[in-house]
Image (spheres, coloured by chain):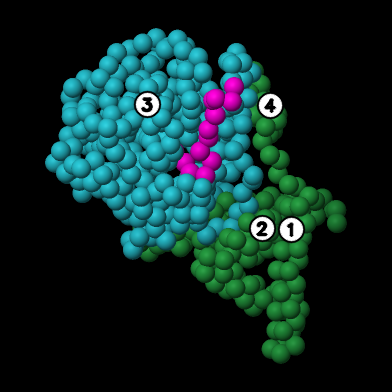
Amino acid sequence: MLQGHQTWVFKSKPTIISSAAIGGPFEAQGNLADDFDLLHGDIWLGQDSYEQAEKKFLEQACETAIKKAGLKKEDIQFFLSGDLINQIMPSSFTARTLAVPYLGIYGACSSSMEGLSLASLIIDTGFAQNALVGTSSHNAASEKQYRYPTEYGAQKPPTAQWTVTGAGAAVVALQGQGPRVVASTIGRVIDMGLSDPFNMGAAMAPAAVDTIEAHFRDLNISPSHYDLIATGDLGRVGHRIAGDLLTVLGGFGLYDDLIKFSGAGASVPISSFGNQLVKGALQEAEKTGLVGVLTGIFKITSAGISSAIIFGFLASVLCKPKG
Amino acid sequence: MSSIKRKNLTPVQQQYQDFARAREPQRPLVINCIRAFIVGGIICTIGQGVQLFFITYFNFDEKTAGDPTVAVLILISVILTSLGLYDHIAHWGGAGSAVPVTGFANTIASASLDHKSEGFVLGVGGNMFKIAGPVIVFGVFSAFVVAIIKVIITSLGGM
């Protein structure tokens, strides 16, 4: 049911009955290493390409989540998944492996929460009993696609973030034990004109703040309603900006020690919802529910394409397209 | 940020970017310069050593020794890239490893490596110059412009 401007309130409170997270070697060194179901020592997983390795990560996450829920894949009615690769290939190929009716989604960093929100909506409306949500990313595959080749030696600025190598999956069901999804606020795309692919935190922070504010406004609640407000992917820089923005703009002078505004620095939410959200404070916060914060940001990463040589370059300097 | 880019932003965007910039860690410019100096210096010293080696033992003179020296440095750079070591050197050394010819070799080798999974013709062949392309384009183009200017000045009786 729509409440306020952009928030869904789920009457049946769909339950996240299981979740799984699979990580790579870098994630194994992080603070959240213990929360992963499976950690791999290399980024290839015996595959021929990064993209195939990412698919493998996602397949394992999905299989683990289904197993942990005590279900078989035949019990899953819909599979919602997204990732960062062109045409969401890892998700699509995982859907082929699972052979479950599939809805592909693309929200870049917000894919995990987008999937969770949509799955909750499907469950809440009674259109399914069990829905599987998955998402994945692969550091090398993302670097290759959005930034520079992985072995290219470029100095990264201190604002640069690290794309996770790993996958997360969760089963959302009508009944069962686990954290419940109470409401979901869908965020807007907020473009503050940042175009640096090595400063994603600052690019995404305004959208996170906008969505969090909208959530409080729509539900007519204050930050103190929650024990924990977690965002994903803002990193150290974006986390600081978002925290300050909320304090400056929001008039939420109410922030006290109870509310730990947590940014997933070590692991991007794309897989961290498997651990950070579900395993952590959320189970305690069951009474208040889950804030699905959709930082609806599309990465505006324009790759520098060298498509024109001298005359092409000259032409672009001197001429305008004639239409 | 250039003033032209800034003009295209709305006041709100500008305000936010100033707000955000105050909360971002600054690039450690001085340290980066020192590191670049050290790494770039070491690479050039190795190059000098290789050049002297060719002059002393292989009958090259100072001019002709340039080509084999460059080839050796490129070979070393490609090997280090293939072993996954060059990017670590470059992360530390910054411009010090990007400016010499080793950086150029790294751009080509790293792109080739990454796209091998897409096949040799369209993968490696098509993507090899992904990063080196702009270097070549602007190198060629600026050389062209400078040459034209020089021809004009010379024909007008200068130099």
- Between circles 3 and 1, the one closer to the viewer is 3
Q: Check disc 4 and give the amino acid type.
A: Asp
Chain letter of mark 2 equals B
Labels 4 & 2 near each other (Cβ < 8 A) = no
Q: Residues within 10 Å of mark 2 (few under 14, many from 20)?
A: some
Number of labelled discs?
4
Q: Are marks 2 and 1 on the same chain?
A: yes
* Spot occupied by residue A155 in the image (x, y as percentages of width and height): 63, 52
The green chain is B
Q: What SS does tag 1 mark?
A: helix
Q: Earlier in the sequence, mark 4 or mark 1?
A: 4
Q: Is residue A39 above or below residue B47?
A: above
- Residue tagged by mark 2? B92
Q: Is residue A172 left or right of residue A264?
A: left
Q: Earlier in the sequence, mark 4 or mark 2?
A: 4
Q: Colour of chain A?
A: cyan
Q: Is residue A164 left or right of residue B96?
A: left
Q: Is residue B133 left or right of residue B38?
A: left
Q: Check disc 1 and give the amino acid type.
A: Arg
Q: Are marks 4 and 1 on the same chain?
A: yes
Q: Earlier in the sequence, mark 2 or mark 1?
A: 1
Q: What SS does tag 2 mark?
A: helix
Marks 4 and 1, how far apart in space?
A: 29 Å
- Residue tagged by mark 4? B18
